Image: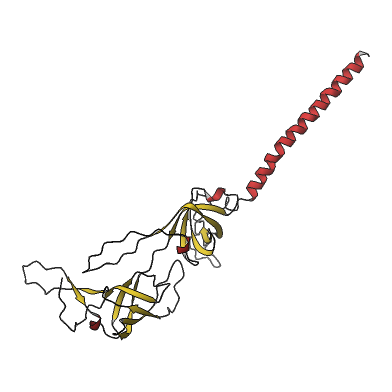
């Protein structure tokens, strides 16, 4: 075998090795390229949200098992667009900045064993009774209602998710609306029931209707119900220190039809129209049938 043949064989072997190494490199790189393409295509929030997002507020659309679907709208405020200076030239127009863009996201939130569900505590301001606050009960997924506006907290940046699913480490529920003001339409003394006509408060982020609708509440009044009011004291003489208003206790017989009263209860007045009154606050102009004793 001459020298030219040996040289050709060496060149051929080198060429084959280069082909093999190039193919191996392409095979090794291809999964990474595909993975990057897939990641970028499954990040719907990446270009829309510009700041890290670890909490999310929205309305509960659906609950199934330990999963809650929450939908909310995010709005981005763009840099202010300068408005053209007013001019008297005919046909001139003033540029008005466009409204900020918005987008609605729906997340599938899993309630994990470590997820904490809480809400602001509900209090009743008693004037006479001394009540020791009871511990706040532990909330579970059954305390979440469809239609509620909740805030979900997570340890992940929602912009970097590969899907719209994540686990929550905390969920904050809206506070209980335990106060309602309305007019007495009927008093059933024997049953200890007051029929109250009132407009329920608007819950969550619902828009206020143009003509709020009144509903009737059946309010139970028993021996545990405090009916009380702060009564101003007699105007002090000149040069003396005025005394603060004094709490006065009343009874259900002091309440009359068409009186405007405020009811404090342990239930949510948005969700229930049958309430147990913890405290009732009558109007300031009430005249007791008996002489109430100040505390």
Horizontal and vertical percent position of residue 95: 53, 61
Where, quadrant-wise, is the N terminus in this rendering? top right
Residue in the image at 34% along x and 78% along y = 219
Residue in the image at 67% along x and 39% along y = 32
Quadrant in which residue 165 is drawn: bottom right
- 277 versus 186 height, above or below: above
Q: Is residue 86 left or right of residue 138?
A: right
Q: Residue furthest top?
A: 2
Q: How many marks?
A: 0
Front one among 65 and 288: 65
- Tell me if I can see residue 97 in this picture: no
- Tell me if I can see residue 143 in this picture: yes
Front one among 129 and 235: 129
Where, quadrant-wise, is the C terminus in this rendering? bottom left
Front one among 251 and 203: 251
Horizontal and vertical percent position of residue 290: 17, 82
Q: Residue furthest right?
A: 1
Residue in the image at 72% along x and 39% along y = 30
Horizontal and vertical percent position of residue 99: 52, 62
- 291 versus 55 height, above or below: below
Horizontal and vertical percent position of residue 103: 56, 60
């Amino acid at each position: 075998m001459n020298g030219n043949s040996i040289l050709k064989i060496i060149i051929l072997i080198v060429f084959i090795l280069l082909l093999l190494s190039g193919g191996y490199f392409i095979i090794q790189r291809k999964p990474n390229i595909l993975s990057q393409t897939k990641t970028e295509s499954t990040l719907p929030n990446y270009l829309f949200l510009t700041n890290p997002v670890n909490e999310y507020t929205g309305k509960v659309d659906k609950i199934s098992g330990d999963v809650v679907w929450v939908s909310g709208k995010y709005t981005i405020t763009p840099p202010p667009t300068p408005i053209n200076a007013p001019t008297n030239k005919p046909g001139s127009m003033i540029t008005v900045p466009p409204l900020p863009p918005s987008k609605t996201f729906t997340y599938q939130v899993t309630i994990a064993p470590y997820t904490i569900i809480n809400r602001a505590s509900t209090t009743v301001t008693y004037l006479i009774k001394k009540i020791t606050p009871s511990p706040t009960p532990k909330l579970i997924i059954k305390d979440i209602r469809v239609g509620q506006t909740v805030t979900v907290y997570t340890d992940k940046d929602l912009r970097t998710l590969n899907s719209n699913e994540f686990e929550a480490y905390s969920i904050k529920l809206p506070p209980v609306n335990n106060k309602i003001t309305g007019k007495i339409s009927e008093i059933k003394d024997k049953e200890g029931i007051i029929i109250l006509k009132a407009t329920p408060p608007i819950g969550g982020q619902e828009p206020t209707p143009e003509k709020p609708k009144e509903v009737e509440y059946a309010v139970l009044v028993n021996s545990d119900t405090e009916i009380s009011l702060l009564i101003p004291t007699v105007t002090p003489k000149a040069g003396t220190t005025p005394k603060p208003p004094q709490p006065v206790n009343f009874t259900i017989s002091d309440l009359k039809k068409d009186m405007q009263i405020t009811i404090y209860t342990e239930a949510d007045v948005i969700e229930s129209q049958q309430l147990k009154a913890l405290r009732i606050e009558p109007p300031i102009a009430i005249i007791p049938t008996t002489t109430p004793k100040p505390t």
